[in-house]
Image (cartoon, rainbow, N blue to C red):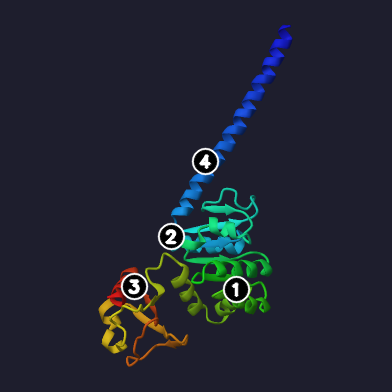
Amino acid sequence: MVLILVGAGTVFYMFGVLLEALIEEHLRHHLERRRMNRQIDRMRGHIIVCGWGRVGCSTAKYLTNLGKTIVVIDHDPQRLQDIEYPYILGDVTDDSVLEAAGIQHAQALIAALDSDADNVYVTLSSRAMRSDLVIIARARTEGSKSKLLRAGANRAVNPQLIGGRRMAAFALQPNVAEFLDVVMHDDTLEYRMEEIAIGAGSQLIGCSLKDVELRRTTGALLLALRIPGGQFIANPTDEIELHTDTVLIVLGTRTQLDAVRTHVAA
């Protein structure tokens, strides 16, 4: 009788311990998920990264270094283990998953899925949900770039092609390639290269670059312009006039770039 009581007590005790552990683990995951969902709901101007592979991971790290907030979407729970970013576990081709990631308040969406077909589908769905959303899609082949652009992507990028070109540039013009690489991606360098658009309310509209005197007033260097028609003008002359939606490609320190933004917005 003693052995029966001890054995039964041990079994019930172990069952209680296991049940408590399961409930506690489930409750912890539930609370973490709720907290993360509230965090995503409060986000504004964030960037959604679809696909947590090598391309998605690299993209997220670069965006984080620039101070951007991101939300990751992937269907594989193994990939999302110990991830440091807010995430949504689910099929990105489902509109409800995009809604949960805050697509209505996002600044941009990056489709970095393994399949071109999935990237096209995500691009179509995202464009239907947000006509003004910036969509950057990964293209595994050159032939799929045109399909992604027709589906609504602002840009279609082939990482393998870009990587090959960068390797060739380092072989032929290593100093030029390294300078651009450092300016765009290295946080240790004080100088940055950024684009600054001229809005409809800017007082610079109709002024020439000579009148603006950007270098004297801000210290930043104007490398190029992109006029509203889409054409780039490198090393622009002083006679060029500024218009609404003209984009300035500027090189300078953070202080100088902030001064350019203030000057443009005035």
Q: Which amino acid type is marked by label 2?
A: Arg
| Alpha carbon separation for disc pair 4 and 3 | 42 Å
Secondary element type, mark 3 = helix
Q: Earlier along the polypeptide chain: callout 2 or callout 4?
A: 4
Say which quarter of the image contains residue 249. bottom left
User: Which residue appears farthest toward the bottom when viewing the image?
Assistant: 239
> What is the crowding at mark 1: few (fewer than 14 residues within 10 Å), some, or many (at least 20)?
few
Is 43 displayed left or right of 206 in the figure? right
| Alpha carbon separation for disc pair 3 and 1 | 29 Å
Say which quarter of the image contains residue 26. top right
Q: Which amino acid type is marked by label 3?
A: Leu
Question: x, y percentage for residue 7?
Answer: 71, 15
Residue that label 3 marks: 257
Check if mark 4's residue and mark 3's residue have beta carbons within 8 Å.
no
Tag of residue 31: 4
Check if mark 4's residue and mark 1's residue have beta carbons within 8 Å.
no
Tag of residue 187: none
Question: x, y percentage for residue 240?
Answer: 35, 91
Question: x, y percentage for residue 45?
Answer: 44, 63
Residue that label 1 marks: 163
Is 114 displayed left or right of 68 in the figure? right
Q: Nearer the viewer, mark 3 or mark 2?
A: 2
Q: Earlier along the polypeptide chain: callout 1 or callout 2?
A: 2
Residue that label 2 marks: 44
Q: Earlier along the polypeptide chain: callout 4 or callout 1?
A: 4
